[in-house]
Amino acid sequence: MASVGIKKDVVTYNALLGGYGKQRNYLEVKNVFAEMKRERVTPNLLTYSTLIDVYSKGGLYKEAMEIFKEFKGAGLRADVVLYSALIDALCKNGLVGSAVSLIDEMTKEGVSPNVVTYNSIIDAFGRSATVECLAESGDGGVMQIFGKLTIESSNRGKKDCKEGMHELSSILEVIRKMHQLEIKPNVVTFSAILNACSRCNSFEDASVLLEELRLFDNQVYGVVHGLLKGHRENVWLQAQSLFDKVNEMDGSTAAAFYNALTDMLWHFGQKRGAQLVALEGRSRQVWENVWSESCLDLHLMSSGAARAMVHAWLLNIRSIVYEGHELPKLLSILTGWGKHSKVVGDAALRPAVEALLRGIDAPFYLSKCNMGRFTSSGSVVATWLRESATLKLLIVHDHVTTKASTTRGPAEQHEQTSLTLQPLLL
């Protein structure tokens, strides 16, 4: 731009900072901000909000703290975007109590939280295995919060969390506060609540959370509660209408909703319902290029959606075999990192899929050159599919239970009623 006589202004610099931030090119972010100062272009509120958001998402909390100090020194006042960026960073690190304290601080400053602010907090309860309890949050000042984040980033895995009823009451408090402030929820809110349900240890706790959905949207509540109770025939038409609305959203938002719903259904033993929802998502192309005769790509799916899809894919391949067709020479199941992990080799999805494959004696094995890929030869899989016992292993069953499926012991499994269902028509 300078070469053709066009001088960069604050709008240009803000766009460059945001662009390099999305690329995680933090060196260029630093260089652009330094150039901005050299050229005597005064940073504005958006400049500081962008920098704090970029550094916080990248885990560079010391840098974010320095930017915030400079921001305060410039006499500017934080807006909802800046506060939401800080709250999101706190929630992603399990410091939910501090995030709630920060909401109180922003409210005192005359800045109203929005749906994005609350979604971060609700989502944190639904995803994190360890979260800071609200009653233990302490001082919510921004500088103290950056200090917590700095310590947290260098001290992973040492959180002290009280789970169970306290955590449930905390998320209920957040949702009810959102309702009191008349903050309209969106699909992201619903997905976050469903993720939180998947972490409940009992159907009763999940039902309490789902009751809050009734305050926001009776249609969403009716569909989710009906599917969870196993009343698919009664609510499926209503579910189709809901899925139509979800598909009007952008791809990642729609996928997040399908993932959250299938996870919750699978978690509470409604595996048939989970599979129907996953296949509905596939037919609506929520997950692109997920399914072919030679490959099942699960890397954008949640654990529940992925496991439901493995069963459906293998049943589909079985029908190909019994129609007399040959399978491709190489079959692959791709797990990638999984949607809950960005650490190579430490994904939550891969071990879940591996356990499923072992549980049904499927002849797929981890590739030596790709830690997220399971492979097998078509001829070996075809032989396995022809075995008389294989079909029973592939058909998913609903378990009428009030306990989460991930926490069942042998005795609980013996007591629950298992419903054998016919294979899905694909």
Image (cartoon, rainbow, N blue to C red):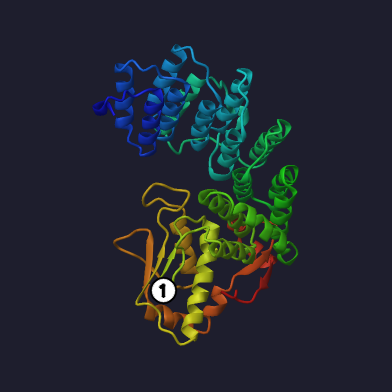
Location of the N terminus by quadrant is top left
Q: On the rendered structure, is 72 left or right of 170?
A: left
Residue 184 coordinates in the image, percent (x, y): 68, 38
Residue position for label 1: 363
Which sits in the foreground, 234 or 173?
Answer: 234
Residue 268 can be seen, yes or no: yes
Residue at image location 29% in from the left, 61% down from the top: 369
Residue at image location 63% in from the left, 18% down from the top: 108
Location of the C terminus by quadrant is bottom right
Residue at image location 73% in from the left, 58% down from the top: 226
Rendered position, 319 above or below 248 = below
Q: On the rendered structure, is 25 left or right of 81?
A: left
Residue 217 coordinates in the image, percent (x, y): 72, 46
Rendered position, 364 above or below 72 = below
Which sits in the foreground, 126 or 117?
Answer: 117
Residue 230 can be seen, yes or no: no
Q: Secondary structure at mark 1?
A: loop
Label 1 packing within 10 angstroms: few (<14), some (14-19), many (20+): some
Residue 265 coordinates in the image, percent (x, y): 63, 58
Amino acid marked by disc 1: Pro
